[in-house]
Amino acid sequence: MSSLAFSPDGSTLTSADDEGRVFRRPVGPTALVKALCAETGGLTEAQWRVHLPEIGYRETC
């Protein structure tokens, strides 16, 4: 059985899968940006040009 729960302050979503593994993810905008930057390092200029060619490059992380 899977389950989901928010922390009392609403800043974290905790989930458990059928194998009993527990995952915690931030859900506020600032925490999400921080987590994404930590995992991906942000977009390079070349990646930005491919995915957002109509918008001038901005550093993402």
Image (spheres, rainbow, N blue to C red):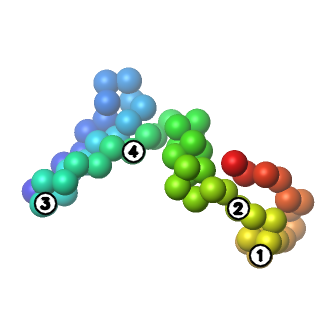
What residue is drawn where x is 52% and y is 55%? 39
Image quadrant in which you'd find residue 27: top left
Specify which label sits upstream in the sequence, 4 or 2.
Answer: 4
The local secondary structure at tag 1 comes to helix
Cα distance between the residues tagged 4 and 3: 18 Å
Q: Do the residues labelled 3 and 2 touch (CB within 8 Å)?
A: no
Cα distance between the residues tagged 4 and 2: 21 Å
- Residue topped by disc 3: 18
Q: Are marks 1 and 4 in contact (CB under 8 Å)?
A: no
- Residue topped by disc 1: 50
The local secondary structure at tag 4 comes to strand
Which amino acid lies under the numbered mark 2 shown in the image of this protein? Answer: Leu
Q: Are marks 4 and 3 in contact (CB under 8 Å)?
A: no
Can see residue 61? yes
Specify which label sits upstream in the sequence, 1 or 4.
Answer: 4
Cα distance between the residues tagged 1 and 4: 28 Å
Residue 17 appears at what percent x and percent y? 19, 57
The local secondary structure at tag 2 comes to loop
Which amino acid lies under the numbered mark 1 shown in the image of this protein? Answer: Val
Specify which label sits upstream in the sequence, 4 or 3.
Answer: 3
Mark number, residue 43: 2
Cα distance between the residues tagged 3 and 2: 34 Å
